[in-house]
Image: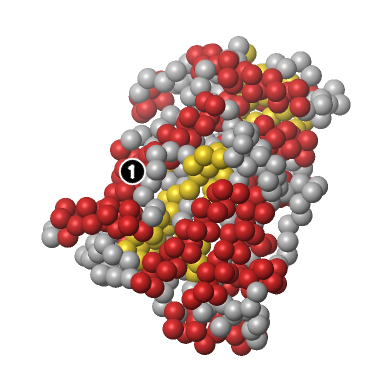
């Protein structure tokens, strides 16, 4: 957590950016897994964490946009709470830790909202994304869940504020990526025949938990990297496989997120084919990172990475024709069907609950409807303090190639006959998290091995520890 002054200052900025009315920020509640008392790991709402810092269920904050006054709603620990959960802070102490001097029981929130409505004031809410929260907001506002209208003014104000990270937030993001780095280095050391995908994923999760963090999203760990969000199975790695690991940690305490992808050669050495495609993705990623600077549209960095990939694939015979024309036509998307990256912060896809387009697009940039580019989550111009992932990839997706081939799609740019020679290759993605600085950008966290010989060296350093048992 940050200081009470930090949260008070953030709420002041928000109150100043919203013209008038009552701002309501709901924290998350526990989410039952299979019955009420057996719930998933608690995950606080990102906007509540940003303005209210408290990583605990059952809380809400109102901020009066006219007077600037904040109220924290929650209950004091009951004796039952203490018996089952141990000593818990009093509500006033929680409020003090975030610079709030007025507290009220949870039920008082309905009264505050009713009063604001009676006075003809606007009540601003963010879009709820959990079923229980939708019902709660619906009850509070007296409208059906489908009729809830989130406040565009509040959404825009929150996004503008949260997209530009302060120095203390960037320090927490560095910590998140440092923990994420430990997860990936351990995974590389475990990339040996005899280990299953599940064993490696479990070890990565263990690193995050042992440090007081937890994965920022379900870890993607697979031999079949071409399946973009593939999770670990009981598949036992064999010599020569590729192991794609896409995972990150929420930092202990602050909960800022890391999100990194690496691809390791199982057994310690990339084949010639593997290193050829790996080098193309690495070149695309490094050039895209270099293109991230203040004023530069993130979409340009995306397009640059796609061109580097198309040029590289032409070099190996999978694509043909002019790479610039191929990318303009969308042919590259058979191999790179997703966007270059996304904003990252307290949410791994930062603020996506507030609307992907509201975060990544503006009056200058509209979302493309072309397959591939349509998945670009963020297009607009970068500014200092923006934190983004940069994660290009090359994927050999048999079903997609078969469909496009049968349709004769982009036959001028894709060598479908050559594809069959690569059909079982899998996929490669390389991902880092960057912060835009005054004149360029910096990769967050410690350097995580990514040049082929660096990754091979880490994999090989684990062989003795992991090969025999
Ligand atoms: N790293 C997973 C994702 O961004 O969707
Ligand atoms: Mn990502």
Outermost residue, top side: 101
* Res. 337 image quadrant: bottom right
Q: Which sits in the foreground, 307 or 401?
A: 307
Q: Residue furthest left?
A: 468
Give the x, y percent position of residue 166: 58, 28
Horizontal relation, residue 47 to residue 172: left or right: right
Q: Residue 270: image x %, image y %?
A: 32, 66
**Residue under the point 44% across and 83% down:** 421
Q: Is residue 444 left or right of residue 222?
A: right
Helix, strand or loop at mark 1? helix
Residue 59, image x and y in percent? 56, 28
Residue at x 31%, y 45% (from the top left corner)? 206
- Please name the residue shown 27% across and 52% down the image: 458
Would you place residue 53 above or below residue 93 in this image? below
Tell whether 66 sits left or right of 401: right
Can residue 277 be seen here? yes
**Does residue 351 show up?**
no
Quick one: which residue is furthest to the right in this view? 120
Image quadrant in which the C terminus is located: bottom left
> Compared with residue 205, is residue 255 higher up or lower down, i.e. above or below?
above
Q: In the figure, residue 140 lies in which quadrant? A: top right
Residue corresponding to mark 1: 182
């Amino acid at each position: 957590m940050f200081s009470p002054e930090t949260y008070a200052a953030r709420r002041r900025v928000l109150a100043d950016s919203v013209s008038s009315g009552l701002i309501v920020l709901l924290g998350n509640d526990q989410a039952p897994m299979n019955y009420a008392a057996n719930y998933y790991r608690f995950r606080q709402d990102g906007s509540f964490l940003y303005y209210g810092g408290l990583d605990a269920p059952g809380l809400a904050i109102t901020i009066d946009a006219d007077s600037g006054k904040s109220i924290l709603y929650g209950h004091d620990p009951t004796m039952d709470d203490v018996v089952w959960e141990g000593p818990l802070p009093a509500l006033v102490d929680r409020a003090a830790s975030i610079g709030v001097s007025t507290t009220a029981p949870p039920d008082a929130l309905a009264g505050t909202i009713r009063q604001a409505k009676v006075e003809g004031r606007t009540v601003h809410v963010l879009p709820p994304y959990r079923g229980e929260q939708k019902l709660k907001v619906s009850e509070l506002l007296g409208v059906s869940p489908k009729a809830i209208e989130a406040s565009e003014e509040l959404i825009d104000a929150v996004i503008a504020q949260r997209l530009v990270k302060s120095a203390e937030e960037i320090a927490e993001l560095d910590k998140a990526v440092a923990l994420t780095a430990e997860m990936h280095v351990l995974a590389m050391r475990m990339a040996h025949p005899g280990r299953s995908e599940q064993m490696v994923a479990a070890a990565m999760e263990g690193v995050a938990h042992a440090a007081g963090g937890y994965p920022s999203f379900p870890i993607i760990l697979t031999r079949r990297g071409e399946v973009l969000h593939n999770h670990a199975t009981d598949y036992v790695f064999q010599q020569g496989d590729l192991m794609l690991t896409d995972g990150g940690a929420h930092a202990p305490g602050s909960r800022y997120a890391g999100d990194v992808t690496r691809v390791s050669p199982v057994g310690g050495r990339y084949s010639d084919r593997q290193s050829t495609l790996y080098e193309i993705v690495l070149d695309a990623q490094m050039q895209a990172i270099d293109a991230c600077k203040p004023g530069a549209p993130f979409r340009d960095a995306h397009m640059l990475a796609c061109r580097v990939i198309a040029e590289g694939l032409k070099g190996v015979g999978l694509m043909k024709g002019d790479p610039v024309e191929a990318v303009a036509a969308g042919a590259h998307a058979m191999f790179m069907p997703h966007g270059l990256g996304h904003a990252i912060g307290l949410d791994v896809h930062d603020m996506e609950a507030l609307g992907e387009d509201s975060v990544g697009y503006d009056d200058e940039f509209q979302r493309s409807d072309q397959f591939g580019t349509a998945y670009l989550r963020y297009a607009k111009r970068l500014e200092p303090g923006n934190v983004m992932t940069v994660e290009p990839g090359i994927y050999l997706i048999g079903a997609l190639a078969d469909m496009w081939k049968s349709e004769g799609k982009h036959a001028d740019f894709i060598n479908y006959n050559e594809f069959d020679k690569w059909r079982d290759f899998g996929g490669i993605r390389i991902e880092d998290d960057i912060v835009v600085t005054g004149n360029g950008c910096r990769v967050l966290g410690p350097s995580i091995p990514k040049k082929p010989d660096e990754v091979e060296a880490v994999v090989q350093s684990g062989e003795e520890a992991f090969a025999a048992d």
